[in-house]
Amino acid sequence: MTILQRLMRFVSVGAVSTVVEYAAVALFTYGLSWRVLLANPLAYLLAAIVNFIGSRHFTFAEAKDQAATTQAGRFAVVHSVALLLDFGIAALAERIGPLGGVAPQWIGKAIALPMIALWSFTLHRLWTFRRLS
């Protein structure tokens, strides 16, 4: 599999995870009337689990014979650092303020998404799901 094909699989898994997260937030907040402070982290966790399973069985399927617990731990580390990067970029965008009438949260997301995706893809490829044999 070429790196471009693998990257496209990675993006596909990320898109499915994003849909799961947004759907879960909607279900929890609108369907179950949960507060956002409970709904959002649970939806994020659910999306992370979907992302791990998709990454393990689709994006990096040749490494699924490795220990799932080791991969899950590594995945959690990469995902946690990615989350911190996302928070940092969002905070910086908010501090800078609107640019050209665009709200800072969208500027932050537009900057963060490709950076974090490349960070995550690279680390997952080289560390989380690396093939040992």
Image (cartoon, rainbow, N blue to C red):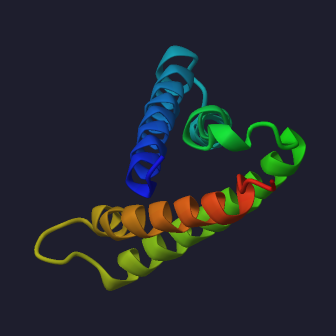
Depth check, front residue: 9 or 35: 9
- Toward which corner of the image does residue 79 lie, by quadrant? bottom right
| Residue at the (68%, 62%) spot, across then down | 78
Q: Is residue 52 visible?
A: no
Horizontal and vertical percent position of residue 26: 46, 26
Horizontal and vertical percent position of residue 77: 75, 61
- Image position of 7 (left or right of 44): left
- Image position of 120 (left or right of 78): left
Count of numbered tags: 0
Depth check, front residue: 119 or 125: 125
Vertical position of residue 4 compared to residue 85: above or below: above
Vertical position of residue 28 compared to residue 122: above or below: above
Horizontal and vertical percent position of residue 57: 64, 32
- Toward which corner of the image does residue 56 lie, by quadrant? top right
| Residue at the (81%, 37%) spot, across then down | 65
- Taking the view exactly as shown, the residue that stands out farthest to the top is 31
- Image position of 21 (left or right of 103): right
| Residue at the (55%, 41%) spot, across then down | 59
Horizontal and vertical percent position of residue 5: 40, 46
